[in-house]
């Protein structure tokens, strides 16, 4: 998690916010908004991603006093995002899970390449995102953080508040659950036997 | 999903389990998801967050005061009335 920050560091912006400079926090939101929104969207789905992102930033704002500055700010923020998203999923537990047909086709931006390639790639990504939303919540979280966002095991462990060994085991089971889901699908995911 | 029992805990020093043949393909597919352009949040996200934070701040401060006063009252009441008499006396 090594986003190159132009301007003051995250820690400096946190310090300024603590001293009452709300514009500094707005810079933090602008800097990390896309990441938080992306992770929220992949955990709770597109409809509630914006609400989760806003709620996560608000929680972070009110808890800045708890940020010790020892870890990376983005990891601390993603931990709050993950907790906020899981809270939304808990509230939603009684409701049916979004099925593949619920995917908003216009939601994903076109991929580069020829129009046919872009269409095929976009379709595959939308199908895969829909499958991700069918996974168990904690499995989806680790797959999004590690395999989609490419975070380190240490970052995933910090965000999920779990030992690295547990993260590795959970990732293994999460990939297994996804493989089973994909194998049951008629779409050809080109999975080796 | 929610009805499934939670995963068993792993020991903290667990090493990575052996890779299945399909794991690499799944990682590649998910990497494709990660590198695809994703919709950005609203351009007004920062404005909305800061605006909400500003009006929530005094409310939260007031709630903190109420909680601390309540805590002090409870502590005082406990000191005054909560001490049990020694049954052996």
Image (spheres, coloured by chain):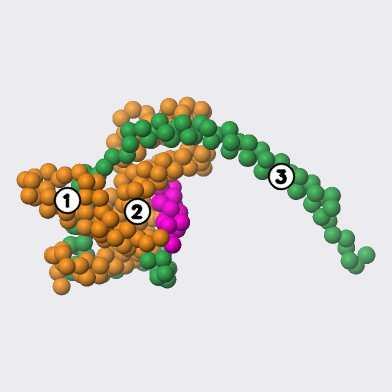
Chain colours: A orange, B green
Residue placed at 12% from the left, 53% from the top? A120
Image height of A41 relative to A169, above or below: above
Horizontal and vertical percent position of residue A149: 28, 50
Residue placed at 30% from the left, 54% from the top? A144
Query: Can you say which quadrant of the picture contains the C terminus of chain A?
Result: bottom left
Q: Secondary structure at mark 1?
A: helix
Residue bearing mark 2: A43
Q: Are marks 2 and 1 in contact (CB under 8 Å)?
A: no
- Determine the image quadrant of residue A98: bottom left
Residue bearing mark 3: B70
Q: Which residue lies most toward the right here?
A: B89
Query: Can you say which quadrant of the picture contains the N terminus of chain A?
Result: top left
Q: Are marks 3 and 2 on the same chain?
A: no
Marks counted in the figure total 3
Which numbered dot is residue A92?
none
Q: Which residues are magenta?
A: A79-94
Q: Nearer the viewer, mark 2 or mark 1?
A: 1
Q: Nearer the viewer, mark 3 or mark 1?
A: 1
Residue bearing mark 1: A122
Image height of A123 relative to A35, above or below: below
Callout 3: chain = B
Horizontal and vertical percent position of residue B69: 71, 41
Residue placed at 63% from the left, 36% from the top? B62
Q: Nearer the viewer, residue B7 or A167?
A: B7
Inspect the magenta stretch and tell me whether residue A91 lies in it: yes
Dominant secondary structure, magenta: helix
Distance of label 3 from label 1 (alpha carbons): 56 Å
Image side of residue B22 versus residue A63, left or right: left
Image side of residue B31 versus residue A59, left or right: left
Q: Are marks 2 and 1 on the same chain?
A: yes
Q: Which residue lies most toward the bottom here?
A: A193
């Amino acid at each position: 998690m090594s986003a190159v920050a132009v301007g003051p560091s995250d820690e400096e912006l946190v310090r300024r916010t603590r001293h009452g400079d709300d514009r500094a926090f707005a810079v933090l939101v602008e800097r990390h908004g896309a990441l938080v929104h992306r992770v929220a969207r992949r955990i709770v789905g597109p409809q509630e991603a914006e609400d989760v992102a806003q709620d996560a930033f608000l929680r972070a704002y009110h808890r800045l006093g708890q940020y010790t500055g020892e870890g990376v700010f983005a990891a601390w923020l993603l931990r709050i995002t993950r907790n906020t998203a899981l809270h939304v999923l808990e509230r939603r537990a009684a409701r049916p899970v979004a099925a593949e047909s619920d995917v908003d086709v216009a939601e994903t931006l076109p991929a580069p390449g020829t129009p046919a390639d872009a269409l095929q790639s976009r379709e595959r990504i939308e199908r895969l995102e829909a499958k991700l939303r069918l996974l168990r919540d904690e499995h989806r979280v680790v797959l999004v953080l590690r395999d989609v966002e490419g975070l380190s095991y240490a970052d995933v462990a910090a965000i999920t508040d779990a030992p690295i060994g547990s993260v590795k085991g959970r990732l293994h089971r999460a990939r297994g659950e996804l493989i089973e889901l994909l194998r049951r699908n008629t779409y050809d995911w080109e999975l080796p036997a | 999903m929610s009805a499934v029992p939670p995963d068993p805990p792993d020991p903290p020093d667990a090493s990575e389990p052996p890779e299945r043949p399909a794991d690499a393909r799944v990682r590649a597919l998910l990497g494709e998801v990660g590198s695809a352009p994703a919709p950005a949040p609203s351009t007004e996200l920062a404005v909305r967050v800061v605006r909400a934070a500003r009006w929530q701040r005094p409310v939260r401060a007031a709630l903190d005061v109420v909680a601390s006063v309540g805590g002090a009252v409870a502590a005082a009441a406990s000191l005054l009335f909560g001490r049990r008499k020694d049954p052996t006396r």
